Image: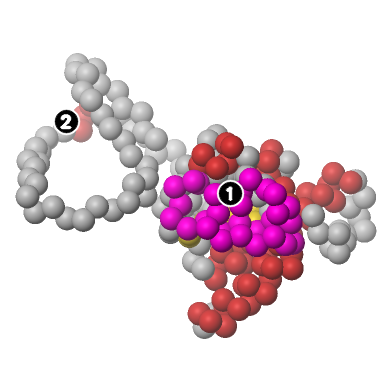
Amino acid sequence: MTKVICREKRPQILTLRSRAFPKPEPDSGRGGEVTRIEADLDEIATEVTGYSESEVGVSLTDAAIIVSGGRGVSNNPLLSPPAEITDEREQEIWRAQQGFTLIGELAKVLDAAVGASRAAVDAGYIPYEYQVGQTGKVVSPDLYIACGISGAIQHLAGMRTAKTIVAINRDPEAPIFKLARFGVAGDLYNIVPPLTQALKERLGK
């Protein structure tokens, strides 16, 4: 969001997140007037101190498709961390990061953005900028694929307006299934890799 300082007036300002509402049909009966205002650029105090390149990829708020991961990405008992990682907590994070690598591969095939639940972010699996939910990004994509996300209220509040929700979770009673249009009760590690491969073949990637 942008902060706007109005020194002399108190106008009513409305901001909308991208994709927050469905695109309406054109209404030829409506009209509008565009008022051009010449700004005094001397009053604008802006200093560019540098640039940084984002590694997030497709913007979460603009993405038509989002593939997100939760705490469940760390639950792969068949994945053994390197011998030099002996701390249990670090092993958990390492497993989760491998899980997000799988999620990233699926997202790449679909030209999608990668997202995450607050639980995954709080656990240190992935940076905050990927967080979807009430305390993160509020999104409204055409397709939202939730992998290993149980469906906490704060997460659902940030993605419930997605047009189609697909949930993959080992727990068939997970709350996410109540919101999902399509649900797969199973281990994401058994589902995501073959799904990614099938989509690669189907889409010719």
Position in image of residue 83 (x %, y %) = 92, 58
Q: Quadrant of residue 188?
A: bottom right
Mark 1 = which residue? 178
Secondary structure at badge 1 equals: helix
Q: In this view, does 94 lie to the left or right of 120?
A: right
Mark 2 / mark 1, whichever is N-terminal: 2
Q: Residues within 10 Å of mark 2 (few under 14, many from 20)?
A: few
Front position in the image: 81 or 7: 81
Residue sitting at x 53%, y 81%: 202
Residue 111, placed above or below residue 25: below
* Apparent side of residue 86 relative to residue 74 in the rendered image (left or right): right
Find residue 164 and report its horizontal and vertical position in percent. Answer: 47, 58
Q: Nearer the viewer, residue 45 or 187?
A: 187
Residue range highlighted in magenta? 159-187
Q: Which of 187 and 136 is in front in this view?
A: 187
Q: What residue type is labelled 1?
A: Lys
Q: Mark 2 points at which residue?
A: 40
Mark 2 secondary-structure assignment: loop
Name the quarter where the C terminus is drawn: bottom right
